[in-house]
Amino acid sequence: MDPQVTARIRAYLSERGLAGWLVYDFRGLNPVFAELMGRTGGTRRAFLAFRAEGEPVLVVHQVDARGFAGLERWVYRNRAELMDALSGLFPGGRRVLMEYSPGGALPTMSYVDAGTFEFLTSLGFEILPSADLYQELFARWTEADLAEHRLAASELGRIVLRAFEFIGENLGRVTEGDVAGFIREGFGAAGLESDSGPNVSVNAHSADPHYEPMGPGATVSAGDWVLIDLWARRPGGVYADITWVGYAGREVPARYREAFDLVRAARDLALKFLHEAWEAGRRVEGWEVDRVARNLVAERGFGASFIHRLGHSLGREVHGKGANLDDYETHDTRALIPGLGFTIEPGLYFDDFGVRSEINVYLGPHGPEVTTPVQEEIVLIGR
């Protein structure tokens, strides 16, 4: 365990009068445990305890104990010994943070099952959410993270434009799967990696926000609408994630253009809101940014067509564990603090097509900064 990380956690707990942070895992249930330890807890219940006073302790079953080194271990054999160990972890009190979200409001930071919650409260623990601690100490980017993200974002902008050119050069012959393969080759040539994707969607397929072609997919021909969503990172770095749209023809039909114009306006209004809040020194929570963009879409009569949150946290996972811009799927009350990166990606989805425009934003020392290319006009494919 990194002593600097331990010291930061200890300081966070002490400043807030908390006894500790109890990170629970059972057979890989909690990704936060794996992130901190570099592995899952094992085949039995494991509890990693960070304490406001004292060094971290791992409470682990004797069957799994040999798999952990470099950390103080309290080994238990049976349920009674587990209860004794947990009861003795925090001499200073029982108010602890865990990956628990009241009402399941934040699924990305909610991994304590109801039975374990009841078990711990029966031992006198008061359990509070760890989401704010995690965000402050682990979701914020370092300067190195930002530099790696910028490189990935620049390459994504180049690759997406080249992908539209590739389509134009092969209209009537190229499929969604071909374009996805072309993009993946571009990732390899640029030294990027991705956990999945990309999303190359033609016409009605673009009405599915998470569509990915299985096999060849649809052929792209003249008059088709195309949405491309691609995400990647440099190895070990922070993800960049963008979405662009194009039309295979000389003049974009009015309904495509009108939908794009509204999506672009919602995107830009959300960014303006962030800038104005920063200039005013006002604390902003994730849900507020979503609400600003969603209200505009609703006022224009298309609220029912905006079917997902406005944006998500970015980290070493494309969907990170920091604050999301969300007042739709959840109500994310986490503050948008300096050092966070996230997407802004409003979308409209109809029976026969969908439109989304996605940019990435970093909250730096001088305010919100867009780190990715910004699409201002629909790409005319094959022009």
Image: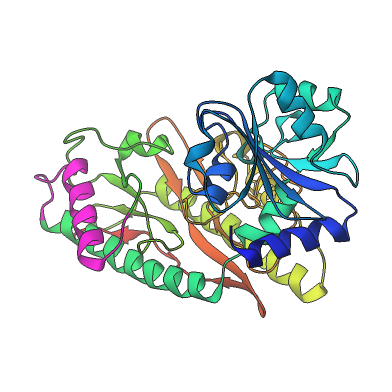
**Which of the pair 91/356 is nearer the observer?**
91
Magenta residue check for 26: no
The C terminus appears in which quarter of the rendering? bottom left
Q: Is residue 297 above or below residue 43?
A: below
**Which of the pair 9/337 is nearer the observer?**
9
Predominant secondary structure, magenta span: helix
Point out residue 284 in the picture as x, y percentages from the top left corner: 77, 59
The answer to whether one can see residue 54 in this image is: yes
Count of marks placed on residues: 0
Give the residues drawn in magenta, as a range: 170-193
Point out residue 279 in the picture as x, y percentages from the top left corner: 77, 76
The N terminus appears in which quarter of the rendering? bottom right
The quarter of the displayed image where residue 364 is located: bottom right
What residue sits 43% from the left and 52% below the top? 257
Point out residue 238 in the picture as x, y percentages from the top left corner: 46, 62
Point out residue 142 in the picture as x, y percentages from the top left corner: 56, 71
Magenta residue check for 174: yes
The answer to whether one can see residue 40 in this image is: no
Would you say 256 lies left or right of 347 here?
A: left
What residue sits 38% from the left and 72% below the top? 151
The quarter of the displayed image where residue 2 is located: bottom right
